[in-house]
Image: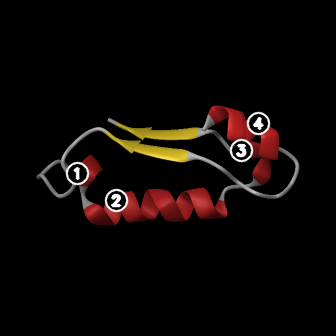
Amino acid sequence: MQALHAQLAGTGVYATSVTIAGAIGGGETRFDPAVLAQAYLDLHHQPESEWQHELLRG
C-alpha cells in the first residue's frame, strides 16, 4: 500500500490501508463501530497534505 500511496501522490487519488487490531464492537471504545466509522470519515475529509499510507487502530 505504501508504494501505491507514493505512486498516486499529487494525482488527487488517495490510497491508504486501515488496520484494526482488535474485535470490532468487542467492548473497547476504540473498536466501537461508530468510532471506526468516524475514523473513515475523517480520512475522507483529510487535506491532501495530511494523507498517510496507513491508519492503525490498535
Q: Secondary structure at mark 1?
A: helix
**Residues at marks 3 and 4, CA–CA distance in whole angstroms:** 13 Å
**Residues at marks 3 and 1, CA–CA distance in whole angstroms:** 25 Å
Q: Residue at x 55, y 39 (%)?
A: 54
- Residue on which disc 2 sits: 35
**Above or below — where is 6 with respect to 49?**
above
- Residue on which disc 1 sits: 29
- Compare marks 3 and 1 and give the one earlier in the sequence: 1
Q: Secondary structure at mark 2?
A: helix
At label 2, counting other C-alpha atoms closer than 10 Å, the crowd grade (few under 14, some 14-19, many 20 or more) is: some
- Residue 50: mark in rendering: 3
Residue 52 horizontal side relative to residue 27, left or right: right
* Image location (x, y in percent) of residue 24: 22, 54
* Image location (x, y in percent) of residue 52: 64, 40
* Image location (x, y in percent) of residue 4: 70, 41
Q: Amino acid at mark 1?
A: Thr
- Residue on which disc 4 sits: 6
Q: Quadrant of residue 57?
A: top left
Q: Amino acid at mark 3?
A: Glu
Q: Nearer the viewer, mark 3 or mark 4?
A: 4
* Image location (x, y in percent) of residue 33: 28, 63
**Residues at marks 1 and 2, CA–CA distance in whole angstroms:** 7 Å
Q: Residue at x 12, y 52 (%)?
A: 26
Residue 30 horizontal side relative to residue 37, left or right: left
Q: Amino acid at mark 2?
A: Val
Rendered-image quadrant of the N terminus? top right
**Would you say the residues marked 1 and 2 are in contact, meaning their CB atoms lie under 8 Å apart?**
yes
**Residues at marks 4 and 1, CA–CA distance in whole angstroms:** 32 Å
Q: Secondary structure at mark 4?
A: helix
